[in-house]
Image (cartoon, helix red, strand yellow):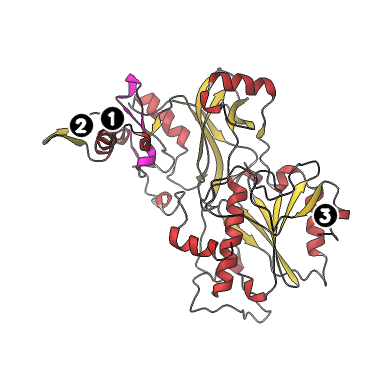
Amino acid sequence: MNALNPYLSNFQIYCTSNSDEEGKTQFPTRIKPDCSVFAKGCSSRATNSSTVELFIEFKRQYDDDPFVIETRSGKSNRMPSLSRNPFMKSSEDSYQTCGQITAYATSHMSAQYRTHIFFVLICKNYARLIRWDRSGAIVTEPIYYDEASGLFDFFIHLDRSPAKVRGQDATVTLANSEESKEAVKAVKELEKETPLLVVSVPDAGSGKWMRYVVASPFASPWVPVGRWTRTSIGYDIQRKRSVLMKDSWRVVLNGVPKEGDVYSKFEAEGVPNVPRCSNSGDIGEDRYHSTQTDRFCREGWFARYEYGLTRHRHYRLILDDIGQPLEGFKCSRDMVRAVRAALIGKFVIGRVEVYVAERGTWVAHKHAYKCGILHRDISPGNILITSDERFEGGLLIDWDLSKDINSESDKGRRATRTVRMECVRIWWILTSWT
């Protein structure tokens, strides 16, 4: 740290091993990376996932390295009987380190709008550089920093690189005072949020970038890869009204249409009980806003490992109709009624079964199917309660894993949902080093 700082013009490395998270967080455990890299001029000196550029973690033993070291002969220090991943070691110490750095990456990527992040892991006399995106992580071979300049060169290049190369999302900026004041006045959900951000979405018709004010994100305990859907009630600067902004990384697979195109089809066909989508589109340059980890699975040297990763593309859409989460029901009867109506098509009042196959979100799915679209991801999180009379009490949302029933592809539904970490396993991994 002391050796590198004099050579950095734009960043500073600080020891954060004894400081708790200062940023907005819902993480279930303490995040205390050994070092954090912040931009010069940043007020942060302690752990702060909302403002950090990258984390650095030190390990004193080689056994703490979670990744294998392959020799030129092709041999490695992996125990093949204990690990299904050919790049991972299987010891308890290596699992703990893997859980630790994954937690750091999760905190970092969830607390900011980023296309990717970098991470530095140092094990005794060598370092590894790790690049995370929404498909996975790319890890370098050991860099023996006393013998080669690779680690030093990385920090020099990081210091001089444009923000988009480092993973910062150029389509997200801080809201100015006028934008913040206007948004807070119009949208009550933004009253206590700080700082407010402006996110941009390209308009398919005019090609212009439409701007929306939303709350800044916070660190949350979700796995760092996948679609990573984030929704925010925001303010449409152009139309001066409240909207729902959805930021996600859509799967790029044949047979999986863009969600905005699905909503456009619904509007044209008059499908009821789905919100109106006023804007949607891919975000930014493909080079930075598409995942890169999946590309390496197609390399020749990777072919001997039967692993595949799904490509994801950064995507946003704007919905004009806003409902309340299903878990926000006011009484159990409302919740049961909504769930039964959406999933089964009937609910019970007293001892009488009342069939509602033509009402609520069930009718939305029925009419969508008639249009050739199958949702494939109906869950409580995708059903909203609304008092708007146009929607008969419910909205069916999140059509990003839907399928054209005339397509023969079925890959889009496999293991691409944003899921929470397995509670027991992750708690063991995280608490073992806190």
Residue at numbered disc 3: 156
Quick one: SS at disc 3?
Answer: helix
Q: Are marks 1 and 2 in contact (CB under 8 Å)?
A: yes
Looking at the picture, how far across and down is residue 131, in whole percent?
A: 65, 56
Q: Earlier in the sequence, mark 3 or mark 1?
A: 3
Q: Amino acid at mark 1?
A: Gly
Q: Can residue 87 be seen by looking at this rendering?
A: no
Give the residue furthest to the right.
6
Q: Earlier in the sequence, mark 2 or mark 3?
A: 3
Residue at numbered disc 1: 360
Quick one: SS at disc 1?
Answer: helix
In-image side of 339 versus 89 (left or right): left
Give the residue furthest to the left.
351
The circle drawn on residue 356 is 2
386 in the magenta segment: yes
In the foreground, 91 or 308: 91
Q: Which residues are magenta?
A: 371-395
Quadrant in the picture for residue 146: bottom right
Q: Mark 2 Cα within 10 Å, few/some/many (few <14, many 20+)? A: some
Above or below residue 206? Residue 122 is below
Q: Mark 1 Cα within 10 Å, few/some/many (few <14, many 20+)? A: many
The circle drawn on residue 149 is none
Q: Mark 3 Cα within 10 Å, few/some/many (few <14, many 20+)? A: some
Quick one: SS at disc 2?
Answer: loop
Q: Amino acid at mark 3?
A: Ile
Looking at the picture, how far across and down is residue 109, in whole percent?
A: 60, 48
Q: Amino acid at mark 2?
A: Val
Above or below residue 151? Residue 89 is below
In the foreground, 151 or 332: 332
